[in-house]
Image: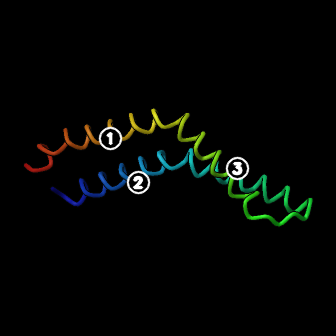
Amino acid sequence: MTDTNVIDIAMQTMTVALKLSAPILLTALVIGFAISLFQSMTQIQEFTLSFVPKLVGVGAALLFSGNWMLHTLISFTQDLFDQIPGLLS
């Protein structure tokens, strides 16, 4: 196994991790920004006003993108396992 192989696998891993975390993080970011904007306009400073919508939004994002996330992770793992014999020689 060469250093090029290690770097390539690390890049693939980071790309998959970014793709898998993007729907959840973007949902939480958009909802958090909208709630913060609403709180600053109305001057309501309530913790649960920010927490509950984010929780619901992240749950909905997992519900809608969970199947895609699972298939992406399975495909990456299978490709990685298929590369093992070539890496050992």
Rendered location of residue 51, percent (x, y) = 68, 57
- Number of numbered discs overlaid on the protein picture: 3
- Residue at left offset 43%, top offset 49%: 15
Label annotation for residue 43: none
N-term mark: 3 or 1 = 3
- Which label lies toward us, 2 or 3? 3
- Distance between the Cα atoms at labels 3 and 1? 32 Å
Whether residue 52 is situated above or below residue 74 in the rendered picture: below
The amino acid at mark 1 is Phe
Task: Give the side of residue 21 with respect to residue 79, left or right.
Answer: right
Q: Residues within 10 Å of mark 2 (few under 14, many from 20)?
A: few
- Residue at left offset 38%, top offset 34%: 71
Q: Which residue is mark 3?
A: 53
Helix, strand or loop for disc 1: helix
Helix, strand or loop for disc 3: helix
Rendered location of residue 70, percent (x, y) = 40, 37
The amino acid at mark 3 is Pro
Rendered location of residue 81, percent (x, y) = 20, 42
Q: Which residue is mark 2?
A: 14
N-term mark: 1 or 2 = 2
- Does the CB distance between marks 3 and 1 fall below 8 Å? no
Task: Give the side of residue 56 with respect to residue 84, left or right.
Answer: right
- Distance between the Cα atoms at labels 1 and 2? 11 Å
- Residue at left offset 54%, top offset 48%: 22
Q: Which residue is mark 1?
A: 76
